[in-house]
Image (tube, rainbow, N blue to C red):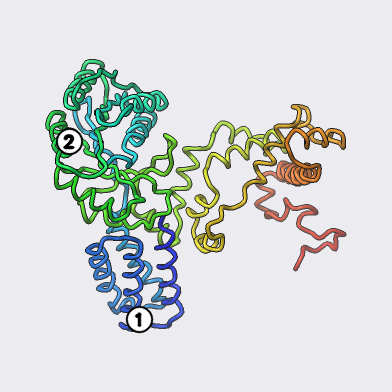
Amino acid sequence: MFETLSGKLSGVFDGLAKRGALSEADVTEAMREVRLAMLDADVALPVVKDFVNKVRERAVGHEVLDSISPGQAVAKIVNDALIDALGGAGAVPLNLNAAPPVPILMVGLQGSGKTTTSGKIARRLAQRERKKVLLASLDTQRPAAQLQLAQLAERAGVASLPIIAGQTPVQIAQRAMDTGRREGYDIVILDTAGRLSIDEALMDEVRAIRAETSPAETLLVVDAMTGQDAVNTAKAFNEAVGVTGVVMTRMDGDARGGAALSMRAITGAPIKLTGSGEKLDALEEFHPERVAGRILGLGDIAGLVEKAADTLDHEESEKLALKMMQGKFDLDDYAAQIRQINKMGSISGILGMLPGMGKLKDALGDKELDTSVLKRHQAIILSMTRKERRTPSIIKASRKKRIAAGSGTTVQEINRLLKQYDAMASMMKRFSKLGVKGLMRQGLSALMPNGGRPPGGGGRPPFG
């Protein structure tokens, strides 16, 4: 989402890095480029002005102009200013400090992803916080909206308020809170109706529901793809009903990202969560320092570790690690690894979280890294018998033809897979013989064929 802004800011810092000491004119020119990059990224004009003034004020100080690495010094100042603009370091958690059932009011325009986000938050609170959650749809405007939320609740593993036709949104809210109190729920999430545009009828309805339920959180759901419209929506809702937090959806889209940078300054409310996909687990806490790091190409290792912790199967990973330590590795294990990689999402998305990978992503352009070979390998392995997967050495010509026909691939592709598997299996065996201490002593080259020596064994490693 921030790729355009990230690319332009990287260009500014690359230009500064080539200079020795910076003059005031250099800083002014760099700030002009930063200003244009932010405006192009759809950041609100008042936010851009404030941001650039803050950076210029600090960048023309002697500590930067006379710095050993002025380009890096300016990048650090821009990074700090980005974190401030996004709301300051650290995620802001949902406020659940109220007597149960705690009401959470979801507001926003139609199509912003409000109902899906309600389901995501319910799942997150039920699974991570071990809360008993009730979902209630107050949307009497959109056909089948209440049914949609009931289906989402089922998928999320939480309860939904039974539908009673003919009730007003305020009556549904009253019934939801009564049910919450009577049946011992910790949290009641109230999903209000949206409109295609902001109107007084919508605001009156939300005000009436808020007055009836006194929510601990009023979360505004905005679509990050709508750019400045998202900022205008946030401003209108905040002035009319008061917003305690923002949830930005479609953060995996290709919009210019400026809405996120504008949101805190315009509403005063922090971005608390972000959505990046339709799946119910595609919801993350918003960490300003991590987003700033990704914008400036510094990566987000902490975010990547969290993503891995949430998506990977730990039991399967431990089993595989144990087999690797014992030098055992079959094609079932390789297929399990492919499944784990697929769970992590797109490879280019993972690359974006690694420091210094922005330029590699730029080189790829709009192309996603080719992972089709993994899918073909998976199809080949699934076309094998259990015995073949456990003992690949028995796979000869006739078996290869059968597997190729079953997987829609060629015998050559099966040969390549088996060759790759042999190399991996040999590495695992060497690893088990060496052990961790031996590996630390001899280095990674010890895992390579011939211990890192060229074939023919001249007794010396390459380039040695």
Residue 405 vs residue 259, the one in the foreground: 405
> Which quadrant does the C terminus fall into?
bottom right
Position of residue 266 measured from the top left corner of the image (x, y, whole percent): 21, 55
Q: How many marks?
A: 2
Image position of 299 with respect to 110: above or below: below
Residue that carries the numbered disc 1 in the rendered image: 26
When asked about the image quadrant of residue 133, the answer is top left
Residue at image position (20%, 35%) is 216
Residue at image position (81%, 60%) is 454
Position of residue 353 measured from the top left corner of the image (x, y, whole percent): 47, 53
Image position of 374 with respect to 14: above or below: above
Mark 1 residue type: Asp
Mark 1 and mark 2 lie on one chain; the one further toward the N terminus is 1
Position of residue 383 measured from the top left corner of the image (x, y, whole percent): 73, 32
Residue that carries the numbered disc 2 in the rendered image: 206
Residue 190 visible in this rendered orientation of the protein: no
- Indicate left or right for 72 with 400 as reference: left
Residue 108 vs residue 348, the one in the foreground: 108
